[in-house]
Image: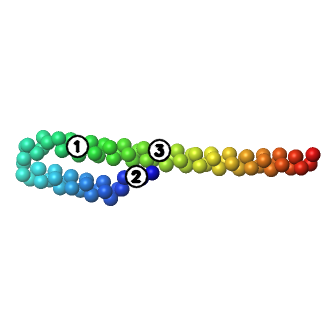
Amino acid sequence: MQGIEPKLHTSLTSRIEYYRLLIEAVDDAESQSSDLVLQISELGNLYDDYLFNKKNLEKSIKNYREYHDHLRKRLTVRLRELKRKAKQR
């Protein structure tokens, strides 16, 4: 699974900030009402959502691995016990 590179996102957000500063400096009303500004905001929301989901996925993977290891160890002990009992018969 591939994730979003923080460097890639940071690079674009830096360009966004530069764009906003230019809009303010030029005082271009047409640019300020542009749908690009809305898309920039949406991109930030999507990235925040991605980070939240990534954190939850990492937590789920950790929980799965811990449970898996615990269950594997219990199963190994039980299998050894049954093998011993089978040999004794």
Which secondary structure, mark 2?
A: loop
Front residue of this view, candidates 89 and 67: 89
The tag on residue 56 is: 3
Front residue of this view, candidates 85 and 13: 85
Say which label, 2 or 3, has the lower sequence index. Answer: 2
The tag on residue 77 is: none
Instruction: Name the colour scheme.
Output: rainbow
Residue 30 location in percent, x, y?
Answer: 8, 43
Q: Is residue 54 left or right of residue 24?
A: right
Say which of marks 1 and 3 sits in front: 1
Which secondary structure, mark 3?
A: helix
Quarter occupied by residue 39: top left
Q: Is residue 88 left or right of residue 39?
A: right
Q: Which amino acid, mark 2?
A: Gly
**Residue at the disc numbered 2:** 3
Report how far apart the C-alphas of labels 2 and 3 lie in the structure: 14 Å
**Residue at the disc numbered 1:** 39
Report how far apart the C-alphas of labels 1 and 3 lie in the structure: 25 Å
Say which label, 2 or 1, has the lower sequence index. Answer: 2
Q: Which amino acid, mark 3?
A: Asn
Report how far apart the C-alphas of labels 2 and 1 lie in the structure: 21 Å
